[in-house]
Amino acid sequence: MLNLERNLLKNFRDYAEKLEEKIHLINNYLEDYNDDIEDANEDPEKYLSNPLNSFRLIRHMHQDWVGWQVYMEDLVAPDAVEKVESLLPQLPQKEAFRKAARNVHSLTQFYGYKPADLVAKDERSSSLHLSPLDCYHLGLELYEEQDYLGAAKWLQVAAHNYTLSRHRDLFDPLGAPRWQVYRDLGRTLLNLNRQSAYDAYESALRLNSQNVHLMKEAGQLELFSLRDPMEPIMDPKPVPTVLEKYCRGEVPRHQGRLTCELNDWVHSFLAYAPIKFEELQQDPFIILYPGIIYEQEIRHVENAYQRCPPNDRFELEQGISGCSISDGYSPVLKRINERILDMAGVEKPWECFYIVEYARETPFEPFKLFRNSTKFPKLNLMNFADVEAKVIIFLKDVTLGGAFTMPKEDILVQPKRGNVLITFENEEHSTTICPIMEGTGLVMIKFIMKTGD
């Protein structure tokens, strides 16, 4: 998508040079979206993994370029127009936009974000930002799906922040004049039986008092007002689930303690090598070793993952893929394996590591995916009963979201490069990874089997 967007921008830049009377408006557009592309060039994977960035990009490509095509109908630069027309079939289609819109709306609900929190006056105060135009089209999509409660939130934000945007002059030629935003807000509020629908229509009429269709629509609204008033449909009080609370960081304070000591209670080797660790819980025993995997080792693992042979690659679900790597792949992997066994105090690991990369916008349970997958015939349901411990090596920080949670155990662990999380379990406890708002997760998993004693 980014290459296509760059191509479209270049063509549009050529076109703008030949339309001096429109140059100011067009340059505003270029400045805005070139900022996004420059951000993407620094780390395209990270940029596209942010669902808000993806939504803004898809929304812009799905809708704005069609508007720009109409705006470019003046044949001052016919070659540029023809190039845009030839590229239109490659743009994201309705289904891609619908999915992106639904993902953004679901994520904001999951993490408790209010739409107003995502619309900054300068529109670039954080990585989580949407323009009023983005909010408007997101609201329209929810309206089409008859999610009027959700649509009202986004349309209200679009209307209230319209004039605050430094790109407000762009919205009209792109098919979203201010009066229309208020009209669509009024339609939505009318479906919710709210009196504020009248205010929205009044605002639309003040902005476009000569629009015959708008006057007729507002007049029909007056007729509806003569009926017996219907009970307004209000937003239900939000009641977050346990998982949502944990992923938002609302975790009960646990008794974990950070310590660094000489000990031999895990393995005799540790009597000679002090290791810093945090005991998160005693039953089941859960322990976190911060910074125990070194940067050079992590880079080696990342390189091995990039060079993973096709036969060793796997996909657990959409957005969750990985690579199986043998313990004996390299001296570095052998050293990491030995260190893990020392930290866990066991001698029988599974035969390989599983490097897993994930960029999911919905929560998922990684170990359940492993257990139910048909891609690992040796690691089936029966084998999982023999798992004594699970080791998670964090190879990458996750910017926003992506925390590992165990709600039943009051555990929340944010991915941090170099940390190792070990859980000793008598039974399978649910480990859930929170949706990712920005970035991608990368972990290396090792299963430690019971010795049979």
Image: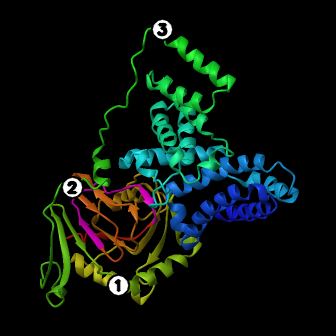
* Rendered location of residue 185, percent (x, y): 52, 32
Question: Hey, what amino acid is under mark 3?
Answer: Arg
Q: CA distance from mark 3 to mark 1?
A: 72 Å
Q: Which residues fall within the magenta stretch?
A: 420-440
Density class for disc 2 (Cα within 10 Å; few <14, some 14-19, many ≥20) is some
Q: Is residue 419 above or below residue 97?
A: below
Residue at 58% of width from left, 42% of height from top?
A: 137
Q: Is residue 14 above or below residue 215?
A: below
Q: Nearer the viewer, mark 2 or mark 3?
A: 3
Circles 2 and 3, Cβ within 8 Å, touching? The answer is no
For the question of whether residue 318 can be seen, the reply is: no
* Rendered location of residue 170, percent (x, y): 64, 50
Between 378 and 130, the residue placed more toward the observer is 130
**263 with respect to 207 (left or right):** left
Q: Which residue is mark 2?
A: 410
Q: Is residue 437 above or below residue 67?
A: below
Q: Quadrant of residue 432?
A: bottom left
Of label 1 and label 2, which has the lower sequence position? 1
Circles 3 and 1, Cβ within 8 Å, touching? The answer is no
Question: Hey, what amino acid is under mark 2?
Answer: Asp
**443 with respect to 246 (left or right):** right
Task: Describe the element under mark 1 as helix, strand or loop.
Answer: loop
Q: Which residue is mark 3?
A: 227
Question: Hey, what amino acid is under mark 1?
Answer: Tyr
Q: Is residue 273 magenta?
A: no
* Rendered location of residue 109, percent (x, y): 40, 44
Circles 1 and 2, Cβ within 8 Å, touching? The answer is no
Residue at 34% of width from left, 62% of height from top?
A: 383
Q: Which residue is mark 1?
A: 294
Q: Is residue 126 above or below residue 234?
A: below
Between 252 and 124, the residue placed more toward the observer is 124
**407 with respect to 182 (left or right):** left
